[in-house]
Image: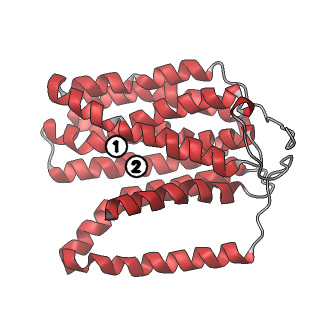
């Protein structure tokens, strides 16, 4: 039950926070979203190291004390939100009911791209330690692989968001999903001595489109950033997480490396979809 409550809290946080990042008029919204997403990725990378060291020093029974610094961060954020008035992006008329027929086709296409990309990233993040230990690596090497993958991903997200502000979201998305598969495959089938190098490269490439996809979706429906953020950060990423169960089931029957080889090729489908994507800003009459 505690895990369910924690999951609900996470689900509530991400769309709301992404909506605040997009509030107001920002010329470099991709860069600002990159700060947000990269911070989360860095946290995911260092959390295993921090918690292992903490438990080793103080014991498992003292982990509830970690609520205190988390609560301090919450109060600081709440104070900032309370002091500021956040406006909608230029061209938006405020929050209105969104009808299904008003959803742009480009947003639907972008959603499928994000689902395929997220599915691959989530699967590799979740099974990395197992893949490394199956090839003879130690448990520490497995943990190090996760940290390398996510830390490189944090840098990739920062670079991708900044680059999208200059050349547009489409080509950053296309480069991310088409360049990642070769390095996923090199990690799976290449020399073990270079596994961490391949992980670093693929993390840099694959995560570069994380903030780009969120901002691109928000710009398709200005004024509905919370709803759109929920679609691409909650529903799309959530489907990627749900796919772990069938992936694990298939891995038990056909081998993890074989199944993950197929998963590594999914971004190629996303790349084909991106070719049909057009960057545009949808406008709607709030009285419709």
Please name the residue shown 23% across and 45% down the image: 129
Please name the residue shown 63% across and 52% down the image: 33
Which picture quadrant has residue 23?
A: bottom right
- Residue that label 1 marks: 125
Left or right placement of residue 125 versus residue 250 in this view: right
Q: Is residue 157 placed above or below 59 in the rendered structure? A: above
Please name the residue shown 24% across and 34% down the image: 248
Of 9 and 189, which appears nearest the observer?
A: 9
Q: Position of residue 128 (x, y in %)?
A: 27, 41
Within-10-Å neighbours for mark 2: few <14, some 14–19, many 20+: many
Q: Position of residue 253 (x, y in %)?
A: 15, 25
Determine whether the residue tagged by mark 2 lies in a helix, strand or loop: helix
Of 34 and 103, which appears nearest the observer?
A: 103
* Residue sitting at the far left: 136
Can residue 180 be seen by looking at this rendering?
Answer: yes
**Screen quadrant of the C terminus:** top right
Kindly report the distance in space between the C-alpha atoms of the residues bearing marks 1 and 2.
8 Å
Is label 1 in contact with label 2 (beta carbons under 8 Å)?
yes
In primary-sequence order, the first of circles 1 and 2 is: 1
Can residue 202 be seen by looking at this rendering?
Answer: no
Left or right placement of residue 30 versus residue 266 in this view: right
Q: Position of residue 215 (x, y in %)?
A: 66, 44
- Residue that label 2 marks: 150
**Dot in front, 1 or 2:** 1
């Amino acid at each position: 039950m505690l895990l369910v409550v924690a999951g609900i809290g996470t689900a509530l946080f991400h769309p709301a926070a992404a909506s605040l990042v997009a509030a107001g008029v920002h010329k470099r919204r991709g860069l600002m979203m990159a700060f947000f997403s990269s911070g989360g990725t860095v946290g995911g990378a260092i959390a295993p190291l921090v918690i292992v060291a903490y438990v080793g020093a103080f014991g498992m029974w003292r982990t509830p004390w970690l609520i205190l610094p988390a609560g301090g961060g919450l109060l600081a954020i709440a104070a900032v939100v309370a002091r500021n008035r956040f406006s909608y992006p230029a061209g938006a008329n405020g929050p209105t009911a969104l009808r299904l027929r008003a959803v742009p086709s480009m947003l639907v296409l972008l959603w499928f791209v994000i689902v395929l990309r997220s599915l691959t990233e989530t699967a590799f993040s979740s099974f990395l330690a197992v893949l490394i230990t199956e090839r003879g690596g130690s448990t520490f090497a497995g943990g190090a692989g996760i940290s390398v993958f996510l830390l490189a991903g944090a840098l990739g997200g920062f670079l991708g968001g900044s680059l999208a502000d200059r050349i547009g979201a489409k080509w950053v998305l296309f480069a991310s999903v088409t360049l990642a598969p070769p390095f996923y495959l090199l990690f799976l089938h290449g020399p073990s001595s270079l596994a961490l190098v391949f992980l670093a490269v693929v993390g840099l490439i694959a995560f570069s489109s994380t903030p780009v996809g969120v901002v691109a979706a928000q710009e398709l429906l200005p004024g509905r950033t919370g709803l759109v953020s929920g679609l691409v950060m909650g529903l799309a990423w959530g489907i990627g997480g749900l796919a772990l169960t069938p992936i694990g089931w298939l891995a038990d029957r056909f081998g993890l490396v074989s199944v993950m080889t197929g998963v590594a090729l999914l971004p190629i489908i996303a790349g084909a979809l991106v070719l049909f994507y057009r960057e545009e800003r949808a406008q709607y009459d709030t009285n419709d």
